[in-house]
Image: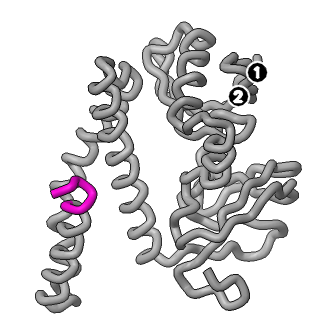
């Protein structure tokens, strides 16, 4: 990366702890407005790579000899014991001292929560307080003050969301392959969440024809063919074909 003259494909991955925040509403959706942050580290990454990647925590985990999946498994086990009334539970994100997870209790809709935690010598210590997480507007920048909040371009959001979905699918498949080699499965929470995602993607596949029709109206067919060929080449490379 050229840190003095960064190209358009570069952005920054932040490791921070919210010191002061407030709840707000933007376009009818709840958002968490970050007012004051305790910044721990900043790293240059490719645009979009910082979304849900845990770049900094991964570096710290590698240094300690513990992988991101190892930490998730430990927290998932600890949460399963702490949330005994849950029908299913899925760890969504793991930060330095906070774990975010979604679960469904009997006769209730699924909700997302966060808990503080510490890991020491393989022992998992969960905070007793369970805090419900209010979903933020996807990929919308928030900041201090009451001025107009900048919105991400739709084309960029499409690419980032697509990358996020693809990344999750590849992660599940890689985990399943590794667990199979160890004679184990991925566990009920991951299986349930994967089935839900597969069902949703099947419905999205039906809607994709509409997106393609939109693209065909404005993009020459040869450019679409090139884009499809590039995608297939990428998929083949990832799968070792």
Give left or right: position of 77 versus 131. Answer: left
| Display coloring | one colour
Q: Position of residue 22 (x, y in %)?
A: 80, 51
Give above or below for 48 relative to 169.
below
Residue at 55% across / 85% down in the picture? Answer: 8
Residue 192 shows in the view: no
Task: Using the image, tell me which numbered label, if any, was put on residue 79.
Answer: none
Q: Marks 1 and 2, Cα distance to the nearest angstrom?
A: 6 Å
Residue 127 vs 67, above or below: the answer is above
Q: Of the numbered discs in the image, which one, if any, rests on residue 115? A: 2
**Quadrant in which residue 187 is drawn:** top left
Q: Quadrant of the N terminus?
A: bottom right
Q: Quadrant of the C terminus?
A: bottom left
Towards the viewer: 180 or 171? 180
- For label 1, the SS is loop
Q: Confirm whether the magenta stretch covers residue 193.
A: no
Question: How many circles with numbers are drawn on the protein?
Answer: 2
Q: Which mark is residue 127?
A: 1
How crowded is the residue under tag 2: few (<14 C-alpha within 10 Å), some, or many (20+)? some
Q: Evaluate whether residue 129 shows in this view.
A: yes
State which quadrant residue 183 falls in: top left
N-term-proximal mark, 1 vs 2:
2
Task: Provide the residue span drawn in magenta.
Answer: 236-241
Residue 241 sits above or below residue 220 on the image: above
Looking at the image, which is closer to me, 85 or 29? 85
Query: Where does residue 20 sit, x and y in percent of width and height?
Result: 87, 51
Question: Where's residue 190, x and y in %?
Answer: 38, 28
In front: 83, or 59? 59
Instruction: Determine whether, in the image, residue 75 is placed left or right of residue 168.
Output: right
Per the image, label 2 sits on a secondary structure element best described as strand
């Amino acid at each position: 990366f050229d840190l003095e003259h960064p190209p358009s494909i570069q952005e920054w991955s932040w490791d921070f702890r919210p010191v002061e925040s407030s709840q707000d509403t933007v376009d009818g959706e709840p958002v968490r407005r970050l007012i004051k942050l305790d910044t721990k580290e900043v790293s240059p990454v490719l645009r979009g790579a910082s979304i849900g990647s845990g770049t900094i925590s991964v570096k710290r985990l590698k240094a300690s000899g513990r992988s991101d999946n190892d930490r998730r498994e430990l927290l998932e086990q600890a949460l399963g014991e702490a949330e005994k009334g849950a029908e299913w539970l899925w760890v969504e994100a793991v930060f330095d001292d906070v774990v975010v997870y979604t679960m469904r209790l009997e006769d209730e809709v699924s909700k997302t929560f966060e808990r503080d935690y510490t890991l020491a010598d393989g022992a998992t210590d969960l905070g007793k307080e369970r805090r419900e997480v209010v979903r933020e507007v996807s990929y919308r920048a928030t900041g201090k003050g009451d001025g107009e909040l900048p919105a991400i371009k739709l084309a960029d959001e499409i690419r980032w969301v697509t990358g996020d979905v693809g990344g999750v699918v590849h992660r599940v498949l890689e985990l399943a392959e590794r667990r199979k080699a160890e004679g184990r499965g991925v566990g009920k929470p991951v299986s349930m969440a994967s089935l839900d995602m597969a069902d949703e993607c099947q419905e999205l596949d039906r809607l994709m024809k509409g997106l393609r029709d939109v693209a065909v109206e404005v993009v020459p067919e040869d450019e679409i063919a090139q884009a499809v060929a590039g995608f297939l080449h990428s998929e083949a490379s990832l799968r070792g074909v």
